[in-house]
Image (cartoon, rainbow, N blue to C red):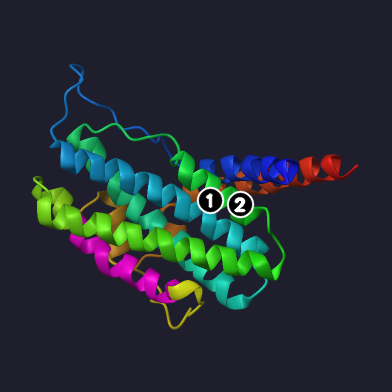
Amino acid sequence: MIRTHRWAATAFTCLTLTGIAAGPAAATAPADGSSNAHATDAAFLRASHQGNLTEIAAGKDAQKNATTDCVKKVGEVLVRDHTKLDADTRALADDQGVDLPLAPTKEQQDTLADVMSKAGTEAYDHAWLKAQAAAHEKTLARIDNQIANGKNARVTAAAKAARPVVAMHLDMVRGGECHAGAAPKAIHAGNGGPVATSLAAGVPVAVAVPALAVGGLLVAGGAFWAASRMRRNDNR
């Protein structure tokens, strides 16, 4: 079991990098180390970025390792939507001088590594859906807290714009059951910047952020190659 978690964690680490393949994860803070954002707003941006990285990695993994078309479809939607949401988050963080974490939290990494250890089995789909339901419930609670207590109008507006998207994701995995349904083909942007603006016009993510799309595929391929090599070595 320890070996299984080790190769899963390795693959997760590589998959996480696909979420930052198009640019640096950390925003450039003012030279004096200060930030234009209130502590509540800064915490929201950081947590949102970590959540987006996690969902992008989870979505990519589901597309490869889920056993049902429904879960694969939900994974595709998560990659699409959280890539767009993270573009908004990055732009806002950069504007506000908020430094962003380079990786998800340890809890997020451990949860996904555990799910990945069940790759290719029915247990994977169940564990993936359960993890996504819990994650999106937490994300909605964080969004609602920002809406109620946020100090920065732009950050709060971004939270309001993200809420229906996250709520739709939760509906797709609520109760650990898969309900892919008719997910929208594109989501509207908040106020995150040029990439967000092009997405607001209905431009697919693969067109709006080609560097991320191509880089993600390359790194994801390397992730699973490394994971499979480690898995084969562990089974010897």
The residue under the point 70% across, 48% down is 224
Badge 2 amino acid: Asp
Residue 154, numbered label: none
Q: 180 above or below 78?
A: below
Q: Position of residue 108 (x, y in %)?
A: 47, 47
Q: Residues within 10 Å of mark 1 (few under 14, many from 20)?
A: some
Badge 1 amino acid: Thr
Residue 5 can be seen, yes or no: yes
Q: Position of residue 3 (x, y in %)?
A: 74, 41
Marks 2/1 in contact by CB < 8 Å: the verdict is yes
> Horizontally, is 49 left or right of 53 in the view?
left
Q: Secondary structure at mark 1?
A: helix
Image quadrant containing the C terminus: top right
Main secondary structure type of the part rendered in magenta: helix
Identify the residue at the far bottom of this view.
Answer: 181
Magenta stretch: includes residue 69: no
Q: Which residue is mark 1?
A: 111
Query: How far apart are the alpha carbons under marks 2 and 1?
Result: 5 Å
The residue under the point 39% across, 36% down is 25
Of residue 77 and residue 214, the one placed in the foreground of this image is 77
Q: Which residue is mark 2?
A: 114
Q: 95 above or below 115?
A: above
Magenta stretch: includes residue 162: yes
Q: 25 above or below 121?
A: above
Q: Secondary structure at mark 2?
A: helix
Q: Which residues are magenta?
A: 158-174
Q: Position of residue 219 (x, y in %)?
A: 61, 44
